[in-house]
Image: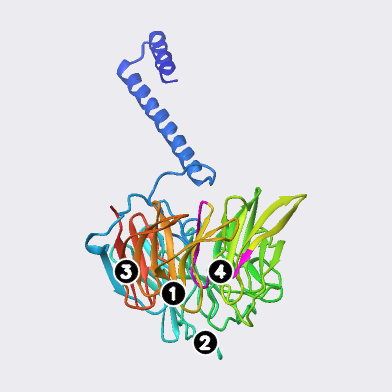
Amino acid sequence: MGNDLILNQRWYLDRQGADVPLVIGRVLLLLCFICLAGFTAFGRKVLTLGSNKSSVSIKKTPEWPQWGGPNRDFKCDSKKLANRWPAGAPRKLWVRPLGEGHSSIVSDSGRLYTMYRKGAREYVVCLDARSGRTLWERSYAAPFLPKMDMSYGSGPHSTPVVSGDFIYSVGTTGKLLCLNKTTGKEVWGHDLWRDLGGTVINVGYSSSPIAYEDRIIVQVGGAGHSLIAFNSKDGSIAWKAHDFRNSSSSPILIDVDGQRQLVAFMHREVIGVDPESGGLLWAHPVTAGWNFHFNISTPVWGEGNLLFVSAAYGVGGRVLHLSRGEGKTRVRELWQSERARVHKENAIRIGDVIYASTGHLGPAFFTAIDVKTGNILWQDRSFSHASFLYADGKFIVLDEDGTLGIASPSPSGLTVHSRVELLGGTAWTVPALVGSTLYVRDRTRVMALQLGG
C-alpha cells in the first residue's frame, strides 16, 4: 500500500510540477499515519485476544485474585521455584502484625487484600505487596450474635475476591461489602443474615464469594435465597433461588460437557446451578453419620467430569461423575469413603490422585487418594492438618502449627525437600503465591517470603 501511494504521488508531480520537498513531506506524514493506524489496530487485536478466555493472553506475572488462586483450584503457573531453601528457610522479604482472622491473601496489581478483626470491628485491608505497608483499610462494626461459638477463631474466615475495579468481602456476621480496590471507599453492601434472612452459622460465615461475568455470587442459605447473585456494580439482586441450608464451603465454577455450572456444597447436599439464572440443574444428597457436621472444604473438579467433595464428622469423601444428555445433567456417585474425609483444609487433584490432609479429631495425615476408586494410596506424617498449593510440580505446604514445607507429590509417595517451623501461632490460612513470592499468615501476623531458585 505504501509503495502504491509513493508511485501515485510521483505521477502527480510529473503532471502538476508541484514542489518536490513539500509533497515528499506529505507522503512521509501519510505513511506515518498508516503505520500508526496499523499498529493501533494490532494493539486492539492483542487486547481482544487477551480478554478472550479461550485465547492466549499477554504474558504477565500471575496474580492470586480470589480464594483458591487464579482458577479456584489452589494451583498457579509460577516457575523456577527452589527445591531447597538456604539455611533451611526461605528468605523473608517482610513481616508485619495483623489482627485475628483466617481470611486468605489475595493479590492484584502489586496490592494485597485480606481481612482481620480487632475487638468488635472487622477490617478489609489493602497492603503494598513489596513492603507490607497499609495503603488503606475499611472497618465496620461486627459484634457477634448471641450463642455464636468463636472458640475456633473469631474470624473473619471468608476470603475476598477482586473483580474489575472492586473488591468484594463477607465478614464473620454475614456483612457483604463492595469496595473500590484503589481507595477502599464503600460502593454498596448487604447484611446477608439480618437483611436477607440467610442461614446463621454459629462459628461464623466462612464461604468465599465468587465472580461470574458482571455478577458476584454468594452462598446465603434459607428459603428462596440459598444462593444470591448480585450485580457487581450496584449490588442489586440479579437472581436468588432455592431453599437449602448454608454451609462453610465455597462455590466453584465448572464446565460439564460444554455447559457452565456453579457447584455449591451446601449443608446436606451438593448442588449444581445455572450461574446465569440460578436454575437448579441437579442436587445430590449428602448424609452425615454424626448429629452435627460442617461442610467446609472446597469441591474439586477435574478431568473425566469427576467432582470430589468431602467433609468430616461422618460425611467422608466421595466422587460424583457428571454428564449431560437430553438437556439434563446426570449424577452418579462412584464411591464414598470415611477415610477420605477432609475437615477444614483444601484438597488438590493432580492427574488421577486427590491430595489432602484427612481426618478431624487428632492427627490429619497428608493423604493420596485414587480419584476413580477412593483407594488410599499412601499417608504421610510430615504435615498434619495442612493447607497447601501447587506450583512448578511441587506442593507448598503450611500446617496448622505454622510449619512450612516444600515437597514433590507422586502416586507412590511424598518427597519433602525442605521444611521449617515458620509461624508461632495457629495457621489455618491457605498460602498465596504470586510469581515466586509467597504470602502466609496466622492469627497474629502476615509474612512475605521469596521462593525463587
The residue shown at (31%, 55%) is 83
Provide residue 424's location: percent of width, then percent of height: 32, 77
Looking at the picture, which amino acid does disc 3 mark? Met
On residue 149, which mark appears? Answer: 2
Look at the numbered disc 3 and give the secondary structure of its residue: strand
Mark 2 or mark 4, which has the lower sequence index? Answer: 2
Label 2 environment density (alpha carbons within 10 Å; few <14, some 14–19, many ≥20): some
Look at the numbered disc 1 and give the secondary structure of its residue: loop
Look at the numbered disc 2 and give the secondary structure of its residue: loop
Looking at the picture, which amino acid does disc 2 mark? Asp
Q: Name the residue under label 3.
A: 447
Mark 2 or mark 1, which has the lower sequence index? Answer: 1
Q: Mark 4 points at which residue?
A: 339
Label 4 environment density (alpha carbons within 10 Å; few <14, some 14–19, many ≥20): some
Q: Give the range drawn in magenta.
A: 336-351
Mark 3 or mark 2, which has the lower sequence index? Answer: 2
Mark 4 or mark 3, which has the lower sequence index? Answer: 4
Looking at the picture, which amino acid does disc 4 mark? Arg
Q: Mark 1 points at which residue?
A: 102
Q: Nearer the viewer, residue 451 or 291?
A: 291
The residue shown at (33%, 63%) is 129
Q: Find out whether residue 339 is within the magenta segment.
A: yes
Q: Which of 259 and 373 is in front in this view?
A: 373
On screen, 441 above or below 35?
Answer: below
Q: How is the image coloured?
A: rainbow
Provide residue 175's location: percent of width, then percent of height: 53, 77
In this rendering, the label closer to the viewer, 4 or 1: 4
Provide residue 208's location: percent of width, then percent of height: 53, 68
Q: Which residue is at the far left?
A: 87
Label 1 – label 3 distance at C-alpha: 14 Å
Label 2 – label 1 distance at C-alpha: 16 Å
Pointer 2 with pointer 4, Cβ within 8 A: no
